[in-house]
Image (cartoon, grey):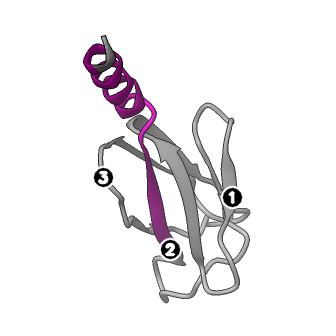
Amino acid sequence: MFILFLIGSVGLSAQFLTFTINGSVRETGNGESLVGCSVTEFSGNKGTASDAYGFYGISLPKGKVGLPYPHLGYETCLFDFELNKNATPHISLERLTSC
C-alpha cells in the first residue's frame, strides 16, 4: 500500500514541474536593451517585465507556452514553444515605422 502511494505521488508531482525562463529583450537594429517590456504567459495568469538591462525571469509549469513580447513602439513578437526544461530565449524586437 505504501509503495503504491509513493509511486502515485511521484507521478502526481511530475505534472506540476516548473521550469525557469530567463532571457533578454533587445532592439533588432542596435541591440539596445528594452526596459519594461511585458512578458506575460499567453493565458495571462503569470507575467513579469524586463529590467533596466533588458533581462527577465519567469517560472512556468511544464507544457505548451506562449509568451507575447509587446513593447510600445515595437512589433510584438510571440514565442511559442514546449517547455520541458529551463529556457533562455533572447528576443529582438523591430521598431515600428511611421506612416
At horizontal 41% and vertical 32% (from top left) the residue drawn is: 13
Alpha-carbon span between mark 3 and mark 1: 19 Å
* In the displayed structure image, the side of residue 47 where residue 16 appears, left or right: left
Instruction: Give the SS element for disc 1.
Output: strand
Residue linked to disc 1: 48
Query: Mark 2: which secondary structure?
Result: strand
Q: Is residue 6 visible?
A: yes
Q: Label 2 neighbourhood size at 10 Å, few (<14), some (14-19), many (20+)? A: many
Residue 9 part of the magenta segment: yes
28 inside magenta stretch: no
- The disc at residue 85 is 3
Q: Quadrant of the N terminus?
A: top left
Using the image as rendered, state which of residue 12 and residue 1 is in the foreground. 1
Nearest-to-viewer mark from 2 and 1? 1
Residue type at tag 3: Lys
Q: Amino acid at mark 2?
A: Ser
| Distance Cα–Cα, label 2 vs label 1 | 12 Å
Name the residue beneath numbered marker 2. Answer: 24
Q: Residues within 10 Å of mark 1 (few under 14, many from 20)?
A: some
- Relative to 78, 9 lies left or right: left
x and y percentages locating residue 33 in the rendered image: 58, 84
Q: Which residues are magenta?
A: 3-23
Answer yes or no: do the residues labelled 2 and 1 have beta carbons within 8 Å?
no
Q: Nearer the viewer, mark 3 or mark 1?
A: 3
Please state the horizontal and vertical placement of residue 62, each as a whole percent of the image: 39, 38
Outermost residue to the front: 1
Mark in front: 3 vs 2 = 3
Q: Earlier in the sequence, mark 3 or mark 1?
A: 1
Position of residue 22 relative to residue 2, above or below, is below
Q: Is residue 91 left or right of residue 74?
A: left
Give neighbour class at mark 3: few <14, some 14-19, many 20+ (Cα, 10 Å).
some
